[in-house]
Image (cartoon, helix red, strand yellow):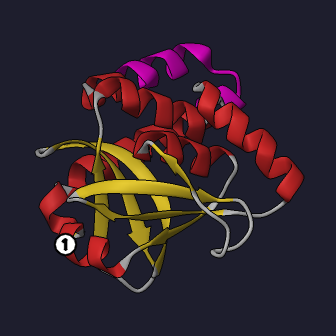
Amino acid sequence: MKNGEIWTVARTSLGTVLLIKFRQEKRVLPIYLTNSQAQRILKGLEGKMESSLSVLFSKLLLHKKSGFIELGFNEGDIQAQLFLSSKKDQGNILDPVDAMELAVVAPLELRIEEELFENRAVEMNLLQRDEIDRLEQLEQRLEEAIRIEAYEDAAELRDQIRAIES
């Protein structure tokens, strides 16, 4: 197993992706998203949960105080499982996007099976790093504009972010 963390959502030449990064690695694991899925994850990164499934599991986590999400392969597709205490417990199978939304809101540790990493991880430079950097930069500027209550600037930055993501 490799431990990963949700890094960002970005529009790349390959489509909209959620990127999971790993310490000491030059590769990232892309999870391809539709635009509506990307919006859900971005809302999660902002601390705004959307899906009822994520709300349910976050409430369960409050009682358990621990847990993790494991990503792996199941018949060639990415499968996500939520474990509320230990690997010995039966994991709850989730839609991978629901799992990522929950991971950013809860926050939960992400564990990625080696096979998934080896088969799906890609080099950073294949994802047009400049687009990712620009999106991250705009998001940071947006947060700062909101913090200092510069709402006109924030609206303009929001529109720029939406243009990159669509």
Residue 123 visible (yes or no): no
Vertical placement of residue 14 versus 40, above or below? below
SS at mark 1 in the image: helix
Q: Is residue 152 magenta-colored?
A: yes
Taking depth in this image into account, of 131 and 46 the one nearest to the observer is 46
Amino acid carrying mark 1 in the image: Asn
- The residue sitting at 50% across, 39% down in the picture is 98
Q: Residue 148's image quarter?
A: top right
Quarter of the image with the C terminus is top left
Q: Residue 65's image quarter?
A: bottom right
* Dominant SS type (magenta): helix
- The residue sitting at 54% across, 41% down in the picture is 101
Quarter of the image with the N terminus is bottom left
Question: For mark 1, does the 10 Å Cα neighbourhood hold few (<14), some (14 to 19), or many (20 or more) residues?
Answer: few
Is 126 left, or right, of 148 in this rendering?
A: left
Is 79 left, or right, of 54 in this rendering?
A: left
Measured as percent of width and height from the top left, residue 47 is found at 67, 36
Magenta span of residues? 145-159
Measured as percent of width and height from the top left, residue 88 is found at 66, 75
- The residue sitting at 43% across, 42% down in the picture is 95
Q: What residue does disc 1 label?
A: 119
Q: Is residue 158 magenta-colored?
A: yes
Measured as percent of width and height from the top left, residue 29 is found at 31, 64
